Amino acid sequence: MTPLTIGKLAKQTDVTIETIRHYQRLGLLKEPAKPASGYRLYPAETVKQIRFIKRAQQAGFTLKEIATLLSLDGTHCHDVRQLAEQKCHKIDQQIQDLQALRQALGSLVESCRQTPASAHCAILEAFNLDQPTKN
């Protein structure tokens, strides 16, 4: 397989050149040495590395978590499974939080429906309460 310039690598992996540079800054990809003749050439295996990163992101992993995954090899399946289980737990918590948020917003919408059009807006009134907000 032929080495690739950063532009060709970006095109083959459907990411931007800046994304590749960002991955390099984070240590997810190695930056090849710049030869005296001009352009850095990336080994063809870099395509697989970028695709791994993108698939892991699609599965919900952050770039920091992906760095951890990349640091583990195939013999650390237990560690990878633990990371995936932690991610599943975090996603479950996010789903619960979103469902609670959806319910609260749905209640505000229903209050608004029951308020006469000429009266004040129940949703805006709820947002304007003189209570401290949670961070």
Image (cartoon, grey):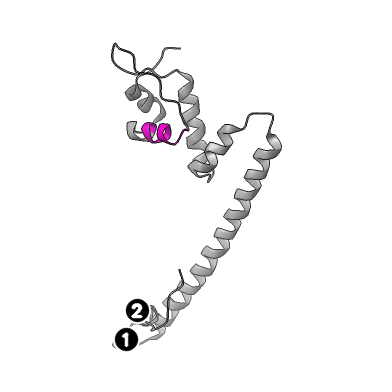
x and y, in percent, of residue 63 in the image: 48, 41
Classify mark 2: helix, strand or loop: helix
Is residue 26 highlighted in magenta?
A: yes
Above-or-below relation of 13 to 38: below
Give the residue displayed 54% in from the left and 64% down from the top: 97
Q: Give the range drawn in magenta.
A: 20-27
x and y, in percent, of residue 22 in the image: 38, 36
x and y, in percent, of residue 107 in the image: 47, 77
Residue at numbered disc 2: 124
Give the residue displayed 44% in from the left and 36% down from the top: 26
Question: Within 10 Å of the Cα at label 1, are there few (<14), some (14-19), or many (20+) other Cα atoms?
Answer: few
Is residue 67 highlighted in magenta?
A: no
Residue at numbered disc 1: 120
x and y, in percent, of residue 32 in the image: 40, 20
Above-or-below relation of 81 to 100: above
- Where is residue 19, by image quadrant? top left
Q: Can residue 36 be seen in this view?
A: yes
- Where is residue 39, by image quadrant? top left
Question: Within 10 Å of the Cα at label 2, are there few (<14), some (14-19), or many (20+) other Cα atoms?
Answer: few
Residue 92 falls left or right of residue 130: right
